[in-house]
Each structure stands twice: as structure tokens, then as C-alpha cells.
Image (cartoon, grey):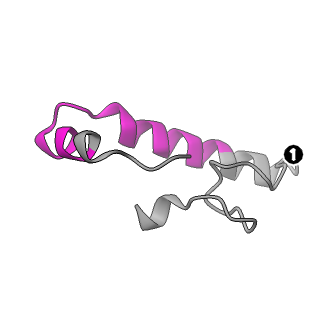
Amino acid sequence: MRKESLIHKILRKLGFIKDIEDDRKFKMEMCKRAIKANVCPEDCDICAWDAKGGSSYENH
């Protein structure tokens, strides 16, 4: 997942954009389910547990 732009960060802080955080939580939940079901490709760019250089939701 690509990083948010400065404009998106400002709009999210002001409360105009809320779906970005909801989208992150949804994708993280989907990753957890994929790992539990052993269907995770382990090379996606949205996975919080991606060991091959993807972005982490915990650091954003």
C-alpha cells in the first residue's frame, strides 16, 4: 500500500476523510484471515506482516 500524501493526512486529521483508516483496518483483517487459512501469498504490498518489503500498518 502506498503512503498517504500530505493533503490526505491533513484531511484525515480534520475529519474529512475517514475511509482511509477503515480501509486499512479492513485490509489488515483480511490479511489475518488469509494467514489463518494458509492462502496468504506472502508477497503482497498491503500485508502488515509482509517480510519482503511491503508497508506495515503499525508504523503509519
Toward the right, the furthest residue is 38
Q: Nearer the viewer, residue 41 or 6?
A: 6
> In the figure, is residue 24 to the left or right of 29?
left
> In the figure, is residue 34 to the left or right of 30?
right
Q: Residue, x 19% and y 38% (percent of image)?
A: 11
Q: Residue, x 51% and y 46% (percent of image)?
A: 2
Residue 57, how many percent across, how many down? 49, 58
> In the figure, is residue 18 to the left or right of 3?
left
In the image, what residue type sits under mark 1?
A: Val
Magenta stretch bounds: 9-30
Residue 13, how many percent across, how many down? 17, 46
Q: Residue, x 47% and y 44% (percent of image)?
A: 24
Give the secondary structure at mark 1.
Answer: loop
Q: Is residue 35 above or below residue 15?
A: below
Residue 43, how many percent across, how many down? 79, 53
Residue 25, how many percent across, how many down? 48, 45
Q: How many marks?
A: 1
Q: Is residue 57 above or below residue 46?
A: below
Residue under label 1, please give it.
Answer: 39
